[in-house]
Image: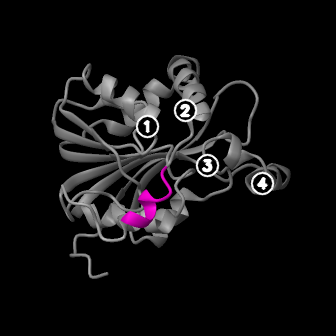
Amino acid sequence: MRLLSGSEKVARNPVHHPLFARCYARYSVRAETRLGLAGIRERMLAGLSGRVIEIGAGNGLNFSHYPGTVAEVVAIEPEPLLRKLALESALRCGVPVDVVPGAAEALPVKSEAFDAAVLSLVLCSVRDVARALGEVRRVVKPGGQVRFFEHGQGGGRVMRLTQRTLDRTVRPALAGGCHLARQPVAALREAGFVLGPQRQVVMPETGPTLPASYCTLGIAWRPDEPDAR
């Protein structure tokens, strides 16, 4: 794998959220059953094959859901504690997973090297969404898939105002850079991906609706033509 020119800028500002990482690691495991996220992961990854790159793998909760038709997963995770947990998860899963450090905005892999990319609750926290999706488009082969499950802007006027207010104040600092009012589907479209089937999901399905509840599960494709950008 090769590092891209420009990745040095990202390296000077590494992702390091130790307190959030510890909290996320505990909460995310409980959410697999309590919020039904395990089933969401299963649907998101069903039918994938070939080489897959997962951006922002966290503690590796997707790994056990990759089907046996996947030849290899390259999992990018910048946060040290979460990456350590992902490495442990990789040892327990049924497909080969290579967990490596790296930033979404400067992926340390060759262009057009993957049949598919996976984005799972990551676009909320990347520093530059457009640049990150540009990198995803670069590394996925023409015609390749992007499987995504992302939360973002939703609800009525009051909820959206709440999301924007939290984004401007305490949310990113408390939640590892996470933003609530981003629009991941629109960002994928603007990055040049062709959008496929999508399903709106409110998490949790029963119980209070929170600013982070508004999610989309879907598929997008990189256009078949070579990337001229």
* Residue type highlighted by circle 3: Gly
Q: Quadrant of residue 2?
A: bottom left
Mark-to-mark CA distance, 1 and 2 = 9 Å
Q: Residue furthest front?
A: 12
Disc 1 designates what residue? 80
Q: Quadrant of residue 204?
A: top right
Q: Which residues are magenta?
A: 8-14
* Residue type highlighted by circle 1: Pro
* Residue type highlighted by circle 4: Arg
Q: Is 11 on the left or on the right of 160, as rendered?
A: left
The N terminus sits in image quarter: bottom left
* Residue type highlighted by circle 2: Ala
Mark-to-mark CA distance, 4 and 2 = 26 Å
User: Circle 2 sits in a helix, a strand or a loop, which is it?
Assistant: helix
Mark-to-mark CA distance, 4 and 1 = 32 Å
The local crowd at label 2, few if under 14, some if 14 to 19, many if 20 or more residues have their Cα within 10 Å, is many
Task: Check contact, mark 1 vs mark 3: CB within 8 A.
Answer: no
Task: Check contact, mark 1 vs mark 2: CB within 8 A.
Answer: yes
